[in-house]
Amino acid sequence: MRYLIRRTLHAVFLLLGVSLLTFLFSALTPGNYFDEMRLNPQISPETVAALRAQYQLDRPLPVRYARWLNAAVHGQLGFSFAYNSPVAPLLWIRARNTLFLTVTATLLAWLLALPLGVWSAARFGRLPDRVISWTTASLLVIPDLVLALGLLILAVRTGWFPTGGLLSVGFDELSALQKLGDLARHMALPVVALVLATLPMLVRHVRASVAEVLDAPFLRAALGHGIPYPKLLYRYALRAAANPLLSLFGFSIGTLLSGSLLVEVVMSWPGLGPLLLESILARDLYVVIGGVLLSMIFLVGGNLFADFLLYWADPRIRTAASAK
Amino acid sequence: MQPLLKVENLVKHYGAGRSARSKDKLAALDGVSLSVLPKTTTALVGESGSGKSTLALCIACLEHPTSGSISFEGIDLASLDENQLRLLRPQIQLVFQDPASSLNPRWTALEIVSEPFFVQRRYSKPDRAVRALRLLDRVAISRKMAARSACELSGGQKQRLAIARALALEPKLIILDEALSALDCSVQAQISNLLLELQASLGLTYLFITHDFGMAAHLADQIAVMDRGRVVESGSAENVLYSPNHEATRALLAATPRFSEPPAELVHA
Amino acid sequence: MTRPPKPTKWLVVLLLLHGIVAAAGFFAPYDPIEQDRERPYFPPMRIHLIDAHGHLHLRPFFYPLRLREGSFDRYEEDTATTIQLRFLASGARYRLLGVVPARLHLFGTAGSRIYLLGSDAYGRDQLSRILYGGQVSLLAGLLGAGVTLLLGALIGVAAGYFGGWRDELLMRLAELFLALPWLYLLFALRAFLPLAVSPLEAFLLVVVVIGMVGWARPARLVRGVVLSAKERDFVRAARGFGASNLYLLQRHILPETASVVLTQAAILVPQFVLAEMTLSFLGLGVPEPTSSWGNLLATLQQYNVLVSYWWMYLPALAIVPFFLGYLSLASALQERASPYKIEEKTNWNLS
């Protein structure tokens, strides 16, 4: 139990640190939205000053951080100057779109990676393993920017997939089934890009951990007892190899909001990524902070989730933690 | 006679940071008192984990004791600052158990022996090489070996090299922390003879730390027995060996193999 | 016969690749910012040995392009005239490695320009732009990695060697930086700095920004090595004959960290090249007319370019052989350092 409490405290500490860091980054940014407004001759200095006061940009930093933190805990993430609306609902819509994409991609990647990795480990050093290793190695040397742009070119040249956006024009007139199809067609490209970007790493880790376990004496003994090989692989080996994979899964969960940033921008998917980029270029302070913070909550939460999974799955951690 | 080294009521706790709770504290030394006379060999015998190595590190000023005092030639070591300590350090040298770890594997034998000169800025450059070679001669390491890197030497050669390095600054006290334990029997004998010879010619004082009463009996004038962070018995070698008072001493003695009384079955067979 | 050790092999490959980019002036036929408004978006041209009449030529040649009838951006080969390719020809002035003035190029033409990899909207030669752009991207990656490793090694050594509260504080900070995703950190840091700057300032900004981001991992690794090195008996022995902290660090502890730092360098350089590419691609890095691998790709964000001019994607492929070289070097180094350990958990993606 102390293990879990320690991990949770650690997560809270991380979140606080991250929030302070992002707040500082943005607060120290030289140009803010009002500076650009000040350059506009049509807006009087008094108006700018009044606006500054309204958003409390003239208060000292610690006060602003404390107020902002207090508000953030209550779900209020401040106000977007550019969109002229509260940040929280703005982020929520974009985050939903991002999650749509990443949850699908992550599930798909894991569903592919597990059998591929196990298969590769079971045929360690033989043809299937070599083919898979070679493929993952070549995917690894293609950076995700290059991959995403390449897919985009492919899509444009073949015309197989729409190249941007979430839904087609006239989406509302489609039947439920057609709606689903339309969404799937729009999602296909970014999902493929995300899956190809994460798959090689996942397959390699599954392969490495299963191969290590397959070498262990207890599995050789189980094979000697006549347990059928497929059952041995999936029921025993995969289970024994679960620990590093659970951590990795937690990491996957953690990057749900932040991992697809580049792909979203390249494929113009209306997720958190393009919003963040836009806000940085427009110096839209609170949107940046809110977006980063939201992603961080996911990241820290994902790691914490992995810790809980590990605690639940591995009796050794439980006993080691209680013995301490 | 004035003792060269006098340790009084020495205590050393580990993990005693402010954050640690009292039950986490580990007393490695729990009030050790010991004195070593010049030009003698004192053996410190104890099981592993009895605090021998911690004591060695404290005496060599490589660990700060939690409380108690160590005085060397009548000077309280705790009263010295880092600069004064640097001048005193050459007087006390330590030879470690595992020569593979106590010699930088990337360095050659010659570099290793001359390192103390370099650190203490003693002698001129050509002088350093001459002295280093002389030291290597002393411990029977050939010129050919001098140019080899430490990882190419055998275990016995490494330990002789470590001893040569400890001699470089002409120390008064050498602490041998299980210095023979990692070696083969024949090599042990060879090196213990070397140690005795060096003591006779250079007038060295040894603090010989071991778990092996056999070795202690061979080398020591005085024996102190350590158990769980305390010295439980000390005196002349004969007294401790032939009329042990403390339980721990008897247990250690019983665990030492002897050839003087062959087992009954063998005699009758 | 012994094969050369793997790290050496990959090091040679990388040296060659970098050599080509460093000597961009020689390998590139033209000045990268020289415009030719008459020839926008020329597709890559072919080099021939056999002409339209079936005659074999000893010198490779090419046909100039002309607009296809009824099109405003489609070209076809005009087989009426052949233009010969000249090797080791004299052409645009450049400074080799930024110092030596020279005019010699690997190849050139008399008369019409040749676009082996096509031209961009202003008729600038893509091949030349890619080669020169590589100088910017690779230099940013190398310098960024240098800054990061210096910072990481300093922090790692300070934390590992001096320990105590300093260690605690620095490692908590490192955890924080490790928890933040790279790209977000890059964004946040870039947002902190002014948007509109000159190319040189932008380049330095990019270097500083990517240099500040990645210090946490090398710092932690170096700290680990220092922690174990400082407990080695040869360090204790040296302290025992009076060595100072500075001496111990210089002579005994820093050499131990060399292999970790090298491996990290092989991992960080391609990551930072990619970081430069990403920043410039998004318009936060080095601006036009200077080319970098990232801003060469930025035109792909225009839909018509994406649809019509596929060769604008070619700069993206330039980084692939470098990635291959660096990652293979890194894993070869890792293998040499710990041959029995299964590959270390490294996340190549920037996310």
Image (cartoon, helix red, strand yellow):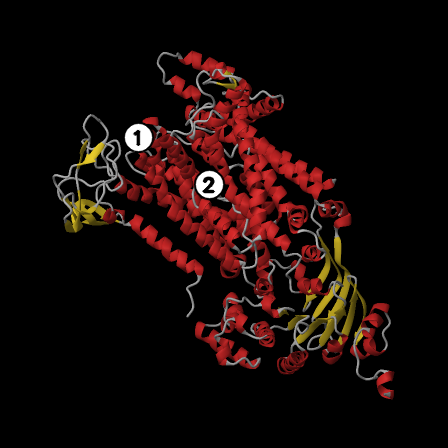
- As drawn, is B29 to the left or to the right of A144? right
When the figure is inspected, residue C97 is found, relative to residue C315, above or below; the finding is below
Q: Residue furthest bottom?
A: B268
The residue indicated by pointer 2 is C212
Quarter of the picture containing the N terminus of chain C is bottom left
Type of amino acid at the residue the image marks with label 2: Met
Tag shown at residue A56: none
Q: Quadrant of residue A156?
A: top left
Q: Nearer the viewer, residue C247 or A272?
A: A272
Asked whether residue A255 appears in the rendered view, the answer is no
Q: Nearer the viewer, residue A148 or C176?
A: A148
Image position, residue A28 (x, y; %) = 47, 29
Helix, strand or loop at mark 1: helix
Image position, residue C350 (x, y; %) = 47, 39
Helix, strand or loop at mark 2: helix
Using the image, name the chain to which the residue with label 2 belongs.
C
Type of amino acid at the residue the image marks with label 1: Ser
When the figure is inspected, residue A72 is found, relative to residue B199, above or below; the finding is above
The alpha-carbon separation of the residues under discs 2 and 1 comes to 39 Å
Chain-order first, disc 2 or disc 1: 2
**Callout 2: few (<14), some (14-19), or many (20+) C-alpha neighbours within 10 Å?**
many
Tag shown at residue C308: 1
- As drawn, is B155 to the left or to the right of A193? right
Q: Nearer the viewer, residue B141 or A296?
A: A296
Picture residue at 47% right of the left edge, 50% below the top? A134
Image position, residue C136 (x, y; %) = 33, 42
- As drawn, is C78 to the left or to the right of B242? left
Using the image, name the chain to which the residue with label 1 belongs.
C
